[in-house]
Amino acid sequence: MDYRYPPDTLPFRMEVRQWLQHNLDEELRGLSNRGALNPEQLDALRRWNRKLADAGYAAISWPAEYGGRAAGVMEQVVLAEEMHRAEAPAALNPIGLANIAPSIMAWGTEEQKRTLLPRMQRGDDIWCQGFSEPGAGSDLASLRCRAVLDGDHFIVNGQKVWNTLGHLADYCELLVRTDPDAPKHQGITCLLVDMHLPGITVKPLTTLTGEDEFSEIFFEDVRAPTSALLGPVNQGWQVAMTTLSNERAGVANLHLGVRKKIARLIQAAREREVDGLPVSRDPIARQQLARVYLYGEYQKALADVCIAGELNGRPPGAESSITKQSWSDIEQLIGETSASVLGAEAQRGDWGDNRLYSRATSIAGGTTQINKNIIARRVLGLPKD
Amino acid sequence: MDYRYPPDTLPFRMEVRQWLQHNLDEELRGLSNRGALNPEQLDALRRWNRKLADAGYAAISWPAEYGGRAAGVMEQVVLAEEMHRAEAPAALNPIGLANIAPSIMAWGTEEQKRTLLPRMQRGDDIWCQGFSEPGAGSDLASLRCRAVLDGDHFIVNGQKVWNTLGHLADYCELLVRTDPDAPKHQGITCLLVDMHLPGITVKPLTTLTGEDEFSEIFFEDVRAPTSALLGPVNQGWQVAMTTLSNERAGVANLHLGVRKKIARLIQAAREREVDGLPVSRDPIARQQLARVYLYGEYQKALADVCIAGELNGRPPGAESSITKQSWSDIEQLIGETSASVLGAEAQRGDWGDNRLYSRATSIAGGTTQINKNIIARRVLGLPKD
Amino acid sequence: MDTHCTEQQEAFRATLRRFLEEKAGTGFTRQRWDEDEPMTADVWQSMTALGVTGLLIPEQADGIGGPMSDMGVVMEELGRVAHPGPCWSSCVGASSAAAIFQLDTLLRALAGGSQTATLALEEPGGRFTCWQHAHLAVVDNTLTGTKIQVPDAIGADHLFVTSANGVYLVATDAPGLTITPTECIDGSRRFAEVRFENVAGTPLGDNAQLAPVIDRMLVALCADGLGAAQRALELAVAYASERRQFGQRIGSFQAIQHLCADMLQQLELGRAGLHYALWAQDAGDPCEAHRAAVMCKAYAAETYPQIGASAIQIFGGAGFTWEYDIQLFYKRLLSTQITWGGSEVWLEELAALVIDGEAPPITVE
Amino acid sequence: MDTHCTEQQEAFRATLRRFLEEKAGTGFTRQRWDEDEPMTADVWQSMTALGVTGLLIPEQADGIGGPMSDMGVVMEELGRVAHPGPCWSSCVGASSAAAIFQLDTLLRALAGGSQTATLALEEPGGRFTCWQHAHLAVVDNTLTGTKIQVPDAIGADHLFVTSANGVYLVATDAPGLTITPTECIDGSRRFAEVRFENVAGTPLGDNAQLAPVIDRMLVALCADGLGAAQRALELAVAYASERRQFGQRIGSFQAIQHLCADMLQQLELGRAGLHYALWAQDAGDPCEAHRAAVMCKAYAAETYPQIGASAIQIFGGAGFTWEYDIQLFYKRLLSTQITWGGSEVWLEELAALVIDGEAPPITVE
């Protein structure tokens, strides 16, 4: 047992830390790459993304031939920690870099790889995924958006929803049904669609926090050239599920955000007073803060188990399957704790939004209910009957 | 809206209270009629039961023709409250009086009514129910204990389990399968079996608290006369499900036990010290005690809704279906709170047993899981698909 | 003995519900969400005509002199549409306060709907405390300092202000008074910070005289919460009965069914406690009225946000959009929790009553 | 960097598990349940032979000088069978204490298994506090007063006793000492009340010197809890995969599946935190070792009883019988919770560390 990071990660950490000290402008600190961006913010983030890319930090897990450094889990973790410590915005295409690029690398034509990947890495193109549809949130296999081959074009009709950054996107990794008679997971094709094509309408989807973070995308007789095809026709499901081998680093970094929020909450409790005493001296608030702190630290301990598993070549175990769920639980616990500790202040500003937003963590990317089904069946081996 | 008990219940309350003051011996106070009774305790409880019966308090909800006073819900509630207040043991046959007797009244022969009911009421015979079987806890319809008609006897073979007071019982309301080919709820027959017949073996079932509260009963070629038949052959299910019309009073009294325990827990917290202060001054203990107190009071408020529903002739609503579940939740909350508030003392004696015992409240009489299924489908109308 | 509403009350409820559905449903709530003025004149006029503004005001002051159990019906119905108007602050709070201090002119104005008023209680700090007056100084009936989270202060004509020197009545157009709206994730409620700089006030009496008003307001707030929670459950059940996933209606999944069963249990326990608390406000024993009100708020604060969150969960992605109404009720339940203190505050008050005070009663007789 | 046990540790675990299954499984635990003596000579001898008694004792005192992470393996395995022996008190607690106070003779006796010893910390009162000494007076190295909940005191040869004057070593056969067993719902653990009436003790040093011993014992207790919780989950999953109700295996019901998924999540978070805490005991920074130990106990106390209760629920009626093993583990987890203080105690200690102390660290570097 050894919980220390391997000593050889230290030079990389120092390299990144110094680079960030010299290259991160003050106004970029803390700028989120999620949600509603105004044009100035988008421009600033694009410039920052290019800087990251030029320094080789935008897509370090990519193979060298695509401009990455084939970084292992430790380097990814260290980079994320340092970016987080410096409050540096992440690259603009988180989904593109982590989820779409691996499919392009594995299935794309030379032309696709050559033209799309560098621009994705630099943030020149913004990418979204077109998977979810109205009426089929977690149930991707039942998707209905369809494409019909017409000469050298696919004619696409249908609707997608929950598209992160859809309103800004230049490209979409789109799943369409091309064989309506095939069983559910088959007959699906993956297209890399230029979002500027005629017939595509993007409508912002206002969330309960009032932000336009997501979009709905409508396709009406959109003519996508066959060159947009990624991988074989009717094998889109396999294509879209392609991931990089060391994806555990992403999940392992979930604790960074929650632990920073917890530290802020503790600090806020120190600075507020009730009946003439700091809230942080109130015995009940102390219990609640200590509990949320404990769960934050345990999320980190769990991340260490994931990282160590990858590092030592073990297949993902129970720790990987519960990470998302325990993260969701703690995000929601932070929301509830902020309400208890800060009172009315938790109804507004960042704390208010954070509490509302925490609800999404048990819905997006697989609901709690579906996660627990999977844990019960795949990890614990409970019967389906 | 009016939460006051009807004024005409007061004379009955005073009558009961005075009777208990004059008739309840000190050594009977607090004696439980559940669980392992030694012969002296059983004798004492039998004498007490006869006193209750002679005064007309043993089965007040029974019709007058069977020695009851056809008491409505208010009288039942008032009697239960006064018995509880005086810590008077209940009659020995709680299940017999409330669940078996109604079936005998509705389906029994004159002979059965005449011989069985008075002795049941006086506690001369102790009754148990033979419903559950190993491998079929909540799933009664799948029972396998069988009886075959042989001349003027049924030959019974099989096993029953979870028989409360089985080791003391003189009679058993037994469900047996008489038509193995009929669908599950059919082909079941109800017999009133003399437990002293040859071929019946009773084995105590030791619970996790170490008590012999329940039994397993084994039937091996037991010859029960056809006079033991209650109701028609193969209609045992309907026979056994017969209940008195105003059964809500029983459920409505669940709060009595929990509220007494909560009062004791609060008192215990006042009397214990930690770091030189009463535990009841500790802010965290105060939150926990106030919370459990609140839920106890709300269980009473819910009981009032049930009582008022019966009193005003409304059919049972959502309040009735959640009463058992909310009672189970609070029994378990009392267990957890006692552990937090009393520390090591909660590991022994009454508090220790109480905590262990609280687990049974979400299992016996329909598990939490089954209750929630029923609430979701029958009360909320959620689909079965 | 009956814990249910009377037939008259149910008829009143039906009238109110019809009116709200037609004229002031969630569409109205959404329309007012970002407006400075929470209400429109015609809706407020109708509320007056329906008897809401005068409900708790004595008949001799042109009111109806109704019981809190009637007001409970109103609040439940308003909660069902997340109504944005100043009913809680003015029709429950200020009306009750004005009656206690026998402010006849104000009572008539409130009953007729021509004026509204509110209570300024809370002061800056972390957790809510009822009687903390560190941030408001009174010299010669002149007030200087700050009150926060004053409900519906914008639009109100008068404020009942608590202070270390007792309760003052202050006109909102008094010189030196500044009212600044406070952001709230629940846009169906309005709160404001009120700053006093040498503002003249009329002394009314002891703070303690407001205690029954606060109890009434706590119970009314919970009645609103119950209505919103009930509506959240109804919407969730309806959605789960329609929406299909993996070829099945999601309401047929046991996990969703049990979530709904839990919500029902939380709701029905809340209803039982609420109705008892409403009755206790009317029944005359102030200690019991207070105990019941405290339990009500502690329970609502702890439980109702969970009902809202479960409903959002059942809606899945749809619950996270502005478009579906379920988010309105979730937010309403969050502000029900936080307004005037969460469960910690009221569990501690309950502990003071039943741990430091008498042993809890076991039977009602 | 690896959070898993080493291959050597896994081999040690396999040996231990085989021994326990063969010679001291839950049948042994049941057999000892109501006996005064928790152990038999042959099982204790085997434990000595396996290296358990000497594991934490320095090599120069005939021990193995192993790390806490090895002892974690032992405790997990002992928890898996709800082992009744005095390993926690003596092999972890007294052995570590004897090493700190350099009691060479005692160390050799403990390592060789010929003696056992324990710590007497807790004093009468409600909630556990580590350093409360209101009930024990020391005059001229003579002790008078009471300690409660002393683990494995019956059968022990020596007690390490904390007092306002520091730590004393007391022989259990010293005149004036009375040891009375204390009832416990978990019969797999033994506690006793120890009364001192002018009992001679040997002064050893400051109470503070025991602090790392207490941290080790907290972590070891949680390792035992993790083993028991793991076993409870295994038994519940196995039962749910077999047992049929309504024609289906109950493990195929979503409600049971989600209950199991929750248990797994609680367990794996606990394992991650425990392994970190074990490592932190060995890694050398006493502050971090303390923080990790405190978190471990707070988490175990809050969570493990829930795992046990869920397992009982899945077993249904069978879980409520003496016959099935699941009740052993439920009880073991309840005593894991209560022994040396529940989550309230350790969350407050954690608050003192991270709220009153430094801001919590965000990265390990």
Image (spheres, coloured by chain):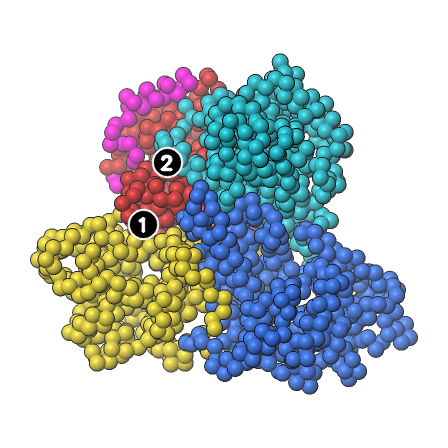
Chain colours: A blue, B red, C cyan, D yellow
Name the one closer to the observer, D337 or D288: D288
Question: On the image, numbered disc 1 is attached to which residue?
Answer: D127
Residue C80: x percent and y percent? Answer: 66, 37
Specify the amino acid type for callout 2.
Ile
Q: Which residues are magenta?
A: B10-39
Could you tell me which residue is drawn at 10 percent across and 57 percent down? D140
Q: Is residue C89 in view?
A: yes
Q: Chain of mark 2?
A: C
Question: On the image, numbered disc 2 is attached to which residue?
Answer: C355
Left or right: residue B89 compared with residue D134:
right
Q: Residue furthest bottom?
A: A65
Check if residue B65 falls in the magenta segment. Answer: no
Could you tell me which residue is drawn at 47 percent across and 46 percent down? A273
Residue A151: x percent and y percent? Answer: 91, 75
Residue B172: x percent and y percent? Answer: 40, 40
Q: Secondary structure at mark 1?
A: loop
Vertical side of D311 occupied by B20: above or below = above
Check if residue B18 falls in the magenta segment. Answer: yes
Q: Which SS does the magenta portion mostly show?
A: helix
Q: Secondary structure at mark 2?
A: loop
Residue B191: x percent and y percent? Answer: 45, 40
Left or right: residue A101 compared with residue D237:
right
Q: Chain of mark 1?
A: D
Q: Are marks 1 and 2 in contact (CB under 8 Å)?
A: no
How many residues crowd around disc 2 within 10 Å: few (fewer than 14), some, or many (20 or more)? many
Could you tell me which residue is drawn at 50 percent across and 66 percent down? D362
Specify the amino acid type for callout 1.
Arg
